[in-house]
């Protein structure tokens, strides 16, 4: 993993760049100008993520394409200094049908089903939880992470607010993410718009703390 220290001033600039990126409503996960390319170039945004989902993780390192026990892979991982707490992050694309796809259309009604992209990303996190629990407190954990046990959460970032609101599917999305618990762990799911808001809230909180401490 790459050791890193959060640079709040740079994070402010990176958040502005994220706002500009999200002016486009159709964003690819990979390739030129993609979400993966954007976040890979802005590690301070990655270091801001834990504050919204695992508050006692003080970010000190990150890794792209993080292997999970040599079987599964997360797009990114952020860890504390001791490498004992992790947030594993999966990005999917941010398009109209990233979360829900049209199932059927009639003159009076249009129905939706969970998209393949959403189910793929969601299943990735379920697999991470499965394998990490399977090897919990075994020699494999020590060999892979350097500690006998880790605390962790998984995060799926996918889609855009505007498409959920347009289709009236926000409550359905909210219900699934609130009530899905795997082995006592939530599968965290947010849109890229929500992620941007969470990162800004965390950044502002840290800036306020830093200003208070400097008095």
Image: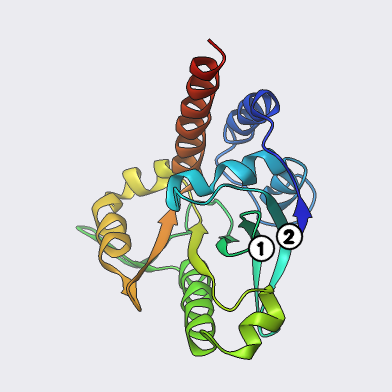
Q: Is 200 situated above or below 31?
A: above
Residue that sits furthest to the left in the current view: 108
- Label pair 1/2, CB-CB below 8 angstroms: yes
- The residue depicted at 70 percent of the width and 27 percent of the height is 10
Determine if residue 204 is in view. yes
Q: What sort of colour scheme is used for the picture? A: rainbow
**Relative depth, front residue between 140 and 203:** 140
Quarter placement of the N terminus: bottom right
Q: Is 195 situated above or below 175?
A: above
Q: Circle 1 sits in a helix, a strand or a loop, which is it?
A: strand
Q: Quadrant of residue 112?
A: bottom left
In the rendering, at what x and y percent does residue 160 appear? 47, 46
- The residue depicted at 36 percent of the width and 49 percent of the height is 164
Instruction: Give the Cα separation between the discs numbered 1 and 2.
Output: 6 Å
Q: Is residue 147 left or right of residue 101?
A: right
- The residue depicted at 24 percent of the width and 60 percent of the height is 175
Determine if residue 101 is in view. no
In the rendering, at what x and y percent does residue 146 appear? 69, 74
Q: Is residue 92 left or right of residue 202?
A: right
Mark 1 = which residue?
75
Q: Quadrant of residue 73?
A: bottom right
In the rendering, at what x and y percent does residue 54 appear? 45, 53
- The residue depicted at 69 percent of the width and 46 percent of the height is 39
Q: Circle 2 sits in a helix, a strand or a loop, which is it?
A: strand
Q: Is 64 situated above or below 116?
A: above
Q: Quadrant of residue 177?
A: bottom left
Label 2 CA crowd tier, 10 Å (few <14, some 14–19, many 20+): some
In the rendering, at what x and y percent does residue 47 appear? 62, 44
Q: Which of the two discs, 1 and 2, labels the residue nearer the N terminus? A: 2
Mark 2 = which residue?
64
């Amino acid at each position: 993993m790459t050791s890193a220290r959060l640079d709040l001033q740079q994070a402010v600039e990176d958040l502005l760049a994220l706002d500009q990126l999200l002016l486009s409503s159709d964003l690819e996960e990979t390739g030129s100008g993609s979400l993966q390319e954007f976040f890979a170039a802005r590690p301070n945004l990655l270091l801001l993520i834990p504050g919204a989902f695992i508050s006692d993780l003080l970010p000190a390192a990150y890794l792209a394409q993080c292997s999970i026990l040599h079987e599964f892979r997360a797009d990114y991982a952020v860890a504390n200094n001791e490498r004992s707490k992790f947030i594993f992050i999966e990005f999917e694309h941010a398009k109209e049908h990233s979360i829900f796809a049209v199932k059927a259309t009639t003159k009076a009604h249009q129905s939706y089903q969970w998209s393949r992209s959403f189910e793929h990303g969601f299943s990735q996190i379920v697999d991470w939880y499965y394998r990490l629990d399977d090897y919990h407190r075994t020699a494999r954990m020590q060999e892979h992470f350097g500690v006998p046990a880790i605390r962790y959460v998984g995060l799926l970032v996918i889609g855009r607010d505007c498409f959920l609101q347009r289709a009236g599917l926000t409550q359905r999305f909210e219900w699934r993410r609130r009530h899905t618990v795997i082995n006592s762990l939530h599968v965290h799911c947010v849109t890229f718009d929500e992620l941007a808001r969470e990162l800004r809230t965390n950044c502002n909180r840290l800036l306020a703390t830093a200003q208070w401490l400097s008095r």
